[in-house]
Image (cartoon, rainbow, N blue to C red):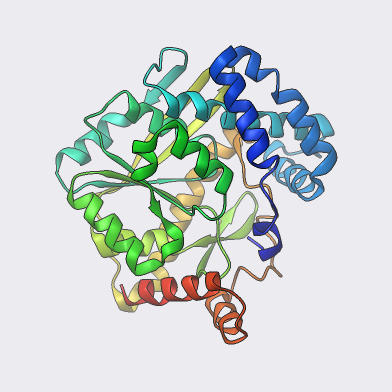
Amino acid sequence: MSTAWRQRPEGGGRVAIWLIRAISRYLGRAPARALLYPITLYFLLRRGPERRASRAYLARTLGRPATLWDVARHIHTFSATILDRVFLLGDRDMSRFDMRVSGVDAVRAQLDEGRGVLLIGSHLGSFEALRGLAQSRPDIKVRAVLDKSQTPAMTQLLEELNPGVAAGVIDAAQGGLAVTLAIKQATDEGAMVTLLADRVYPGETVVRAPFLGEAADFPSSPWLIAAALQVPVSLAFGLYRGGNRYDLVFETFSDGIRIERHHRAQALAGLVARYAQRLEHHARAMPYNWFNFYDFWKHDDDGSGQAHTAAEANLAAGDSDAARRRLRQQRALRRA
């Protein structure tokens, strides 16, 4: 992810999110969904970089040039999942949603071992739908790893809708060692900890893997954390099928990742390639569910390749606290 894209503001910001929440709360989901059309139009007209990224991505998954209608459908799907966060996190009544669940018994079996589980997800579909499943199963403790500084409006919404879930969030911006220790504490308590593994931030080390026809950068940190903690790992996808329908797909990935130091590069490459392969499978099956609205394959991006070298340069120049945090994170993970 480029620094320029990361610094772009949330579309609509706090006012738009507050409006959606108010209409959803007082009028219901159906009237609130009518707002998705002007929101889609806003993104089509005002958010050029996201529109172009959507079209480039869709061309890969659809196997043809993407039309403006395809892009509109893509943005509408994203907006619909954002709206559903209000209902997935705000109450325990899941009857309004038609959720088809597969593979969850294997995750429960992993949890029964008492070591906790790392649930690796992506920006494909709705991760809130997966947390919504946990809403209906209070016996399953869920902790999410999120960078609160990246989406402050959505963070505020989560705190207002469900303070309990918000209090359990592990802030990824606090640094690698602190994050790893927080995840370890959660898994030691038998919790399911969710991580997203398909977005690279400036300052992170990366592993390249084939994805939708071309090699792309993926972060190494989720897999280094998994190897350091030696806990079971599963993949999860909350795929939106339109209307009130979701597919919640869980896939067992490993009973415990082990990476030998002298084979670290090869082991990481294999892990990321397996993850990218499953991500591609679901992206091709549900192409409008991909919500990384930036050039995922860009090679001259300052957030990829020599990421930790760039972080050191930013730090030397006194650029930002963020660069310092990312640098500490990568050093801690490399020692893991």
Residue 220 image offset from top left, x and y in percent: 45, 64
**Residue at 40% across, 58% down:** 222
Residue 10 image offset from top left, x and y in percent: 66, 46
Residue 192 image offset from top left, x and y in percent: 29, 43
Q: Quadrant of residue 80?
A: top right
Q: Is residue 18 above or below residue 262?
A: above
Q: Quadrant of residue 167?
A: top left
**Residue at 76% across, 47% down:** 56
Would residue 257 be visible to someone looking at this image?
A: no
| The residue positioned farthest toward the left in the image shown | 113
Q: Quadrant of the N terminus?
A: bottom right
- Camera-side residue of 47 and 53: 47
**Residue at 23% across, 34% down:** 108
- Camera-side residue of 261 and 247: 247
Q: Is residue 175 above or below residue 182?
A: below
Q: Quadrant of the C terminus?
A: bottom left
Residue 210 image offset from top left, x and y in percent: 57, 56
Would residue 104 be visible to someone looking at this image?
A: yes
Q: How many marks?
A: 0
**Residue at 36% across, 65% down:** 224
Q: Is residue 314 above or below residue 322?
A: below
Report the side of 297 relative to 320 (left or right).
Answer: right
